[in-house]
Amino acid sequence: MKLVFVIKALDNIGGTERVTIQIANLLSMRSHEVHIVSLVGNNKPFFEVLPEVKLHYIHQGSDNSIFPYRDLRRHYRLKNCFASINPDIIIVVDASRATFKIPACKPYTTIYWEHFNSLMKSKPMQVLSRRLVSKHGSWVVTLTEADALSYKQKYGTNKVSCIHNPITIDLPPYTEPTKHKAVAVGRYTSQKGFDLLIKAWAKVEDKKDWKLVIAGKGKQTKLLQSLIKKYELTSSVELIPPTNNIQGLFKESGLYVMSSRFEGLPLVLIEAAAMGLPAVSFACQTGPDEIIEHEKTGLLVPPMDIDALAKSIQTCILNDNLRIQFSKNAASYVGDKFSVKNIIDKWESLFNQLKQS
C-alpha cells in the first residue's frame, strides 16, 4: 500500500517523532511505499529514516505568518502534496491537533493517531479536533485502552481502537541490571516532571554510590540545574544531552524512573523494560499502568507524590534481589506484549480492514 504519515516536524527528539519514524521504517520493510510529510522545517531528522521512506517538507524554515494565512498556506501545500502522492491511506500524527489538516485529508482514507492523554482536561481546540476527527476521520488509533474507551464515551465513535507502541530497539541478550545508576529520559518540560524527580532524589536517604542521570534537553534546563544546586546534588545527579543510542544508555543503568505529570504511552518506558530495567513510575492517568505490573515488573506510586517516589527508589536501591526479579519479569512481560511483529501486524490488519470497507 501507499502510506503517508503527517507529522509537525521530524527534527524533534520526542517519543512521538521517534515512534512515527520507526513505524514508517518497519512498514517500509514490509514492502509498503511509505512517505512522511513534515509540516514545519526541513532539518535532518533526529532519528534515522530508511532511504526507502520518502520525506516531504510542506514549509521549509519557521513560519511566523499570521493565522489564518499560515494554516491556509499549509492546507493548499498539503493538499497538493497528497495529490502528487495519491496515497491509499493517510496517518495523521496527533489527533488532538488535527483541525486544519482535516480538509486536505478528507478525500482520502485517513487514520488519526492520538498520542496524548484524552482523559485529562484538554484545551478547547484539542476537544474540537478530537470531535472533528471522530466525525470525519476513517478511524482513530489510540496508544492505550483507556484512551480508546474515552473516545467512545466522549466523542460517540466506535471507529477507534488501541494499538500500542512497539519495542523498536535491537535488544541485546538479557543481563541482570547491576549498574548503580538510575536513569530518566525525555524533554526538559513540565510534563516530564524532572523537577519532581530531582526533589524526590534529594529525599532518598541512603543513595549508597548510586547516581541519577537525566538525558534530554529543553526549556527547563536552567530550572533543573538550579534544583540540583539547591539540594546539593551535584555529585549524584547529572544532566546529559539526548541520545539516539538509547540501548547504550540503558545497558549502563540499573533502574528507570518516570516522573511524568501525564503521559500517552511512553515508548521509553516500554524499551527500558524490554531491556530488563526495573522501573519506578508515577501512576499517570494513562500509560505506565499498561506497561508496569505493580510489584512484579516495577513499582507504581500515586501521581505527584514525591515522598512515595523517593521511598520506592530507595526500596529498589537497597534490595538487589527485588530489583533483579523485577528486571526478569519486565523483560519477559513487555517483550511479549509490545513485540514489533504483533504491533505491525495490527497496523496492517487495520489498513486492510479500511481498504475493504
Image: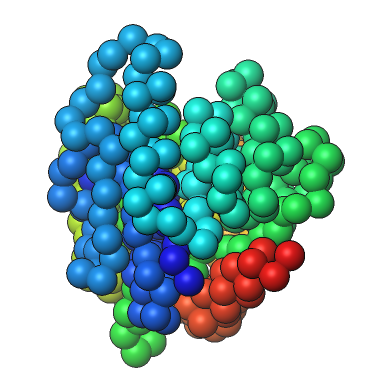
Protein image colouring: rainbow
> For residue 9, what is the image quadrant?
top left
Q: Is residue 119 above or below residue 86?
A: above
Report the side of 217 relative to 286 (left or right).
left
Question: Split into 4 quadrants, where in the image is the C terminus?
Answer: bottom right
Q: How many marks?
A: 0
The one nearer the camera, 172 or 17, is 17
| Image location of residue 65, percent across then percent down | 28, 14
Which residue does the image show at 69% across and 48% down from the upper left?
Answer: 147
Q: Is residue 221 above or below residue 263?
A: above
**Residue reaching furthest bottom?**
173
| Image location of residue 39, percent across then percent down | 33, 37
Report the side of 3 relative to 70 (left or right).
right
Q: Is residue 177 above or below residue 201?
A: below
Which residue does the image show at 67% across and 64% down from the upper left?
Answer: 354
Which residue does the image show at 55% across and 29% down from the upper left?
Answer: 99
Q: Is residue 150 visible?
A: yes
Which residue does the image show at 34% across and 35% down from the upper left?
Answer: 77
The one nearer the camera, 166 or 174, is 166
| Image location of residue 26, percent across then percent down | 39, 74
Q: Is residue 255 visible?
A: no
Report the side of 36 relative to 332 (left or right).
left
The one nearer the camera, 297 or 262, is 262
> For residue 67, what is the image quadrant?
top left
| Image location of residue 255, percent across then percent down | 40, 63
